[in-house]
Amino acid sequence: MNMTQVTFTQADGAQVSVEANNGEHLMKLALDNGVEGITGACGGSCMCATCHVTVDSVTGQLAGPGEMEAEILDMEVDDPQETSRLCCQVFVADDIESINVTVMEG
């Protein structure tokens, strides 16, 4: 089984890189590896935006945001970007070789 390289860039510019298995979501990876700026206040149920990231690059196919995620981004994020995602809704898949995300403040 291939591992996916996930790199989080924190608000201070520091990077945290981890390897992830198929099916893991980015919020759990961030929390398990001490990534600053990801709190996941709702426990990953797509009800807040405390795990807001932007996807900087991805090697492979990443599914787009679902309807609920898009709604939360629209309601809870001041200036959502085209690449804004809630990392509790981004899952690692076998066909994703690497993904780089930036943790957004607030």
Image (spheres, helix red, strand yellow):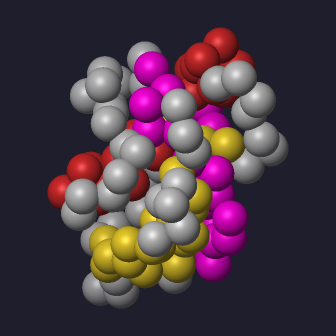
In the rendered image, the residue lying farthest to the top is 75
- Taking the spot 57% from the left edge, 58% from the top edge, the residue there is 102
Task: Please say whether residue 57 is one of the residues in the magenta stretch.
Answer: yes
Q: Which residues are magenta?
A: 48-67
- Taking the spot 37% from the left edge, 43% from the top edge, the residue there is 38
Q: Against 2, is 63 above or below? A: above
Task: Please say whether residue 64 is one of the residues in the magenta stretch.
Answer: yes
Q: Is residue 71 visible?
A: no
List x then y, in percent, for residue 47. 43, 17
Q: Which of 82 and 59 lies nearest the eye of the viewer?
A: 82
- Taking the spot 67% from the left edge, 43% from the top edge, the residue there is 84
Quadrant of the image occupied by residue 104: top right
- Taking the spot 51% from the left edge, 61% from the top edge, the residue there is 12
Q: Against 36, is 51 above or below? A: above
Q: Which of 9 and 26 lies nearest the eye of the viewer?
A: 9
Image quarter where the N terminus lies is bottom left
